Image: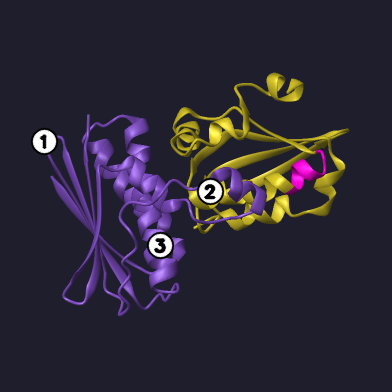
Amino acid sequence: MQDRLRISCSRQNLQQVRDFVRGFLLTAQRSDLVVNQVVLAVDEVVANFIIHANGEDATQFLDLLLVLANHNLDIEIEDYGSTLFLPQGKVANPDLKAYIQQGRKGGMGMALVSRIMDQVEFFERNSHTVCHLSKVLS
Amino acid sequence: MGPIMKVTAQPADTTLTLLLDGELDASSAVVLDTELNKPELLRYKKVLIDCQRLSYISSAGLGVFISHLQRLQDSNVKLVFFNMQEKVFNVFEILGLDSLMTIVPTEQEALAA
């Protein structure tokens, strides 16, 4: 099964993204815990695209594609903005004790994504940034 | 569309309980940040976070708690989470934050922490 969603680059659309992913996976009868993890991973990537890659420019948009075949979940998030955004797919473990001491707010999103998803890739396609996430769902 | 996060403050003597209702993401985390930035918070010995109605948290929400934790500790204010849903606790676990923050099952245990 597959489904698509297009959203503009406003953080107000994050809830719509989560509801979209949640609805797709719950239709496929996946557990609440697994669903929440995947919803979180997508939320984190989309939030990064919206805030850091597109500066919350609501005239820009992202396309989300969810594909579930047997137990293999593939997610593609394509950024139609003009700036390429290619963060590392895998990130080092954030030093959370140091973050607490520094009072640091950010820098954990991609660590969450890396730990939840089996594969995380960012690449360029037709001058757009694409993030591909995949996970084998139990 | 209404707000996706509501924070209700319930003060009592030396303890302040913040009841979180909704989803904490990059758009709603500011609501929590505003609440935790209030100077009167430092008058309490404990700030309890009631998570019964917290249905979702992303790194933005975690980041708000992380950004305030040291300041609270430096002022001898203990931050304790309770009533956390399994799927929300799981997010803390994924990052290892469950060992750096005080998270207990019930309000009674939170008051005693």
Instruction: Name the residue: 42% across, 76% down.
Output: A57
Find the distance from the CA under tag 3 to the CA under tag 1: 29 Å
- The colour one sees for chain A in the rendered image is purple
Q: Would you say residue B14 sits in the magenta stretch?
A: no
Find the distance from the CA under tag 2 to the CA under tag 1: 32 Å
Name the element at disc 3: helix
Instruction: Name the residue: 24% across, 31% down.
Output: A29
Q: Main secondary structure of the magenta part?
A: helix
Pick whichever, A51 or B31, lies toward us: A51
Q: Is residue B110 visible?
A: yes
**Circle 2/circle 1 CB separation < 8 Å:** no
Q: Which residues are magenta?
A: B71-76
Pick whichever, A54 or A124, lies toward us: A124
- The colour one sees for chain B in the rendered image is yellow
Pick whichever, A41 or B1, lies toward us: A41
Chain identifier of the residue bearing label 3 in the image? A
Residue A127 sits above or below residue B30 on the image: below
For discs 2 and 3, the disc positioned in front in the rendered view: 3
Residue identifier under label 1: A70
Chain identifier of the residue bearing label 1 in the image? A
Residue identifier under label 2: B24
Marks 3 and 1, the one that precedes in the sequence: 3
